[in-house]
Image: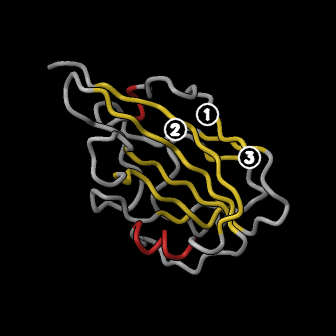
Amino acid sequence: MQLTSTAIKDGDQIPITYTRDGKNIAPPLSWTEVPEDAAELAVVFECVTPATKEPFTQWLVYGLSPERGGLPEGLQHKRDPERPEEAVHGRNDMENVGYDGPLGSAGKRMDYVFRLYALARALDLEPGADRETFDAAVKDILINSAELACQHERPPA
């Protein structure tokens, strides 16, 4: 599988638009080469800076159809009954449901990664599931994964 974005190049700085200093909206994501036996896809965005004890979850989204080729910029936080193909958002580590972009400390580089998961069966998770619940649910059904790394360094004030 491959995970890409028209807004973020692998390993580069995440544009300010997708941070809490900007519009704080989810970037567009695209994927290819999804395994044929995938029943569902999920995306996790997390801070993986070594200084953090555990990765810090910024975004958790699941319930994605394997036929879907990506996510649009600014994906809505809540499921729209008129668009059932939309994603289901989990709870991030800021205790919010939906996307919360990087903020970081002024002058300190933080490392982030978007992860795409291909799952053998659909998750039976309600909207707003936390990361621990999500991880337990995908533990034995993960088929494949792909990553898109980025970084954020908040300018000094």
Question: Which residue is pictured at 56% across the width and 72% down the height?
Answer: 139
Q: In which quarter of the image is residue 20?
A: top left
| Among the two numbered marks 2 and 3 on one chain, the one whose residue lies closer to the N terminus | 3
Q: Is mark 3 on a helix, strand or loop?
A: loop
| Mark 2: amino acid | Pro
135 w.r.t. 7: above or below:
below
Disc 3 designates what residue?
Answer: 1
In the rendered structure, the answer to whether residue 110 lies left or right of residue 146 reads left
Disc 2 designates what residue?
Answer: 27
State how far apart marks 1 and 2 are (Cα). 7 Å
In the rendered structure, the answer to whether residue 119 lies left or right of residue 155 reads right
- What mark, if any, has residue 71 been given in the picture? none
Q: Position of residue 59 (x, y in %)?
A: 43, 53
| Mark 3: amino acid | Met
Question: Which residue is pictured at 49% across the width and 78% down the height?
Answer: 126
Q: Where is residue 23 in the image (x, y as percent from the top left)?
A: 36, 35
**Front label number (2 vs 3):** 3
| Among the two numbered marks 1 and 2 on one chain, the one whose residue lies closer to the N terminus | 1
**Crowd class of label 2 (few under 14; some 14 to 19; many from 20; radius 10 Å):** many
Disc 1 designates what residue?
Answer: 5
Q: Say if mark 1 contacts mark 2, CB within 8 Å.
A: yes
Q: What element carries label 2?
A: loop
Question: Which residue is pictured at 26% across the width and 41% down the height?
Answer: 51
